[in-house]
């Protein structure tokens, strides 16, 4: 900041410190020969890094204003001693008749620019210290490191296990929830599986006439196949995108569902195209595979489609009429019942009951998408789910009993309740459920 200029001090005798008058050649007190005073050195290495002293030192190096009597004699050197090194330099005295020199604003003089003085044995070229010391940047590996959910202290390695206690960490897909307009879906790993191999897609769009259309796709990865989680994800995403693109273009919902299942099948088949070296190291691996079930709901139409043993249930909102199952499983148990060889209870009690006879994958026998269209005469809720849920509510009446009465108004909460029902029953499998209200409400229209 600015400093108030100080008045120049009168010269004194270097021997006795007696004040001198301008023009004296000898000290009047001790007779010291003033002409013997050595000339002032050109450099001024001793600087006090203070605004006033720096200004004075720089002012001493500038030519001073003088009157008609000529320039005044140079100031005498400071008396010897330690104090001389620290004393600031003063501006040369002015002639009495001349006005004082204008003060010079102190420029910024970094300490590193001052040259060292070998004679004084002190260095003044030390780099200037910053006003703030920046903190060291954190190690990026630690910045993104996950902390164990079990011990809350260990770092989680790339394999998903704690380096401290060895606890396996939950994956991103272990529990998923999503709402899209009036639709909601929940998926959970369950209590026995080490990962979630289910996947889903929910969305809403508008038909060419402006009417709403709701879409839900649920896929269940085949655990005995390679990369079942990748298969279910690819199928759900592909089928969902296909439907949401085809319906606004005027495709009939049932035809759109058929084409979506075919597109999902191609996406899962593409996962089997691995390098030859991968097959050499694991020749007995099966191609990725999954099941698929989906529903399309409009203002007056309900369309379902499926391959495998995931299901769709219909539950009336007022429970005034009985609920119903809208799909037939592609499974060993279903074939036994259809052929009349077993009743439903006997077939599903057999250990072979859940062996599927239809799926999406490169090693499927033959792709046979199933589709069906319904026109319910009353409002209700469509339940789209994997066997991880219907294993604990197989009959339509059991599913309706587990479904909350306000499911149409609170679909996410109702989906959470159904997943909790499966977990309370044992949670032996991954659990995924999507809820779609019928008819599709007008506010459900819009972009997905």
Image (spheres, grey):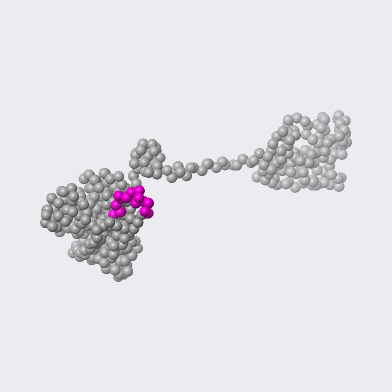
Measured along the vertical axis of the image, is residue 421 above or below residue 369?
Answer: above
Occupied quadrant, residue 17: top right
Please give the name of the residue rendered at 52% of the width and 41% of the height, measured from the top-left corner: 136
Please give the name of the residue rendered at 29% of the width and 47% of the height, measured from the top-left corner: 189
- Camera-side residue: 257 or 360? 360
- Camera-side residue: 115 or 258? 258
Quarter of the image where the C terminus is located: bottom left
Q: Position of residue 219 (x, y in %)?
A: 28, 55
Q: Position of residue 162 (x, y in %)?
A: 37, 39
Q: Position of residue 430 (x, y in %)?
A: 27, 49
**Residue 352 in sight here:** yes
Q: Position of residue 18 (x, y in %)?
A: 82, 32
Total numbered circles: 0
- Camera-side residue: 73 or 276? 276
Q: Give the magenta part as a residue range.
A: 275-289
Left or right of 21? Residue 391 is: left
Please give the name of the residue rendered at 34% of the width and 44% of the height, measured from the top-left corner: 170
Left or right of 28? Residue 199 is: left
Measured along the vertical axis of the image, is residue 18 above or below residue 305?
Answer: above
**Residue 175 in sight here:** no
Occupied quadrant, residue 83: top right
Is 279 colored magenta in this rendering? Answer: yes
Quarter of the image where the N terminus is located: top right
Is 313 colored magenta in this rendering? Answer: no
Please give the name of the residue rendered at 47% of the width and 44% of the height, measured from the top-left corner: 140
């Amino acid at each position: 900041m600015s400093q108030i200029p100080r008045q120049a001090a009168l010269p004194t005798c270097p021997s006795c410190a007696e004040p001198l008058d301008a023009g004296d050649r000898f000290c009047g007190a001790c007779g010291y020969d003033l002409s013997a005073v050595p000339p002032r050195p050109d450099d001024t290495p001793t600087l006090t890094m203070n605004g006033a002293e720096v200004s004075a030192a720089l002012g001493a190096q500038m030519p001073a204003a003088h009157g008609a009597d000529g320039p005044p004699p140079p100031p005498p050197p400071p008396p010897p001693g330690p104090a001389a090194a620290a004393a600031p330099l003063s501006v040369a005295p002015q002639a009495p008749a001349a006005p004082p020199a204008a003060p010079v604003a102190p420029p910024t003089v970094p300490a590193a620019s001052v040259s060292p003085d070998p004679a004084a044995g002190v260095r003044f070229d030390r780099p200037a210290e910053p006003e703030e010391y920046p903190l060291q940047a954190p190690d990026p590996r630690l910045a993104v490191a996950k902390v164990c959910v079990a011990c809350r202290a260990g770092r989680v390695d790339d394999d998903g296990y704690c380096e401290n206690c060895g606890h396996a960490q939950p994956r991103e897909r272990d529990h998923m929830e999503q709402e899209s307009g009036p639709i909601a879906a929940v998926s959970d790993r369950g209590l026995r599986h080490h990962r979630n191999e289910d996947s889903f897609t929910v969305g809403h769009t508008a038909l060419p006439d402006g009417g709403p259309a709701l879409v839900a796709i649920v896929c269940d990865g085949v655990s005995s196949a390679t990369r079942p989680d990748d298969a279910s994800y690819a199928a759900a995403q592909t089928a969902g995108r296909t439907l949401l693109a085809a319906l606004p273009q005027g495709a009939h919902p049932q035809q759109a569902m058929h084409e979506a299942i075919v597109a999902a099948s191609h996406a899962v088949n593409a996962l089997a195209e691995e390098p030859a070296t991968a097959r050499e190291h694991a020749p007995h691996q099966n191609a990725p595979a999954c099941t698929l079930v989906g529903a399309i709901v409009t203002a007056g139409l309900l369309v379902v489609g499926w391959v495998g043993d995931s299901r769709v249930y219909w539950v009336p909102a007022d429970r005034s009429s009985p609920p119903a199952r809208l799909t037939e499983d592609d499974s060993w148990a279903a074939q036994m019942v259809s052929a009349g060889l077993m009743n439903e209870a006997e077939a599903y009690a057999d250990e072979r009951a859940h062996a599927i006879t239809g799926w999406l994958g490169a090693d499927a026998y033959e792709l046979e998408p199933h589709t069906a269209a319904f026109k319910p005469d009353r409002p209700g809720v469509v339940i789209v789910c994997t066997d991880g849920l219907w294993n604990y509510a197989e009959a339509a009446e059991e599913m309706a009993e587990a479904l909350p009465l306000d499911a149409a108004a609170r679909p996410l909460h109702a989906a959470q309740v159904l997943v909790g029902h499966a977990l309370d029953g044992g949670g032996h499998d991954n659990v995924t459920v999507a809820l779609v209200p019928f008819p599709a409400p007008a506010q459900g229209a819009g972009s997905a």
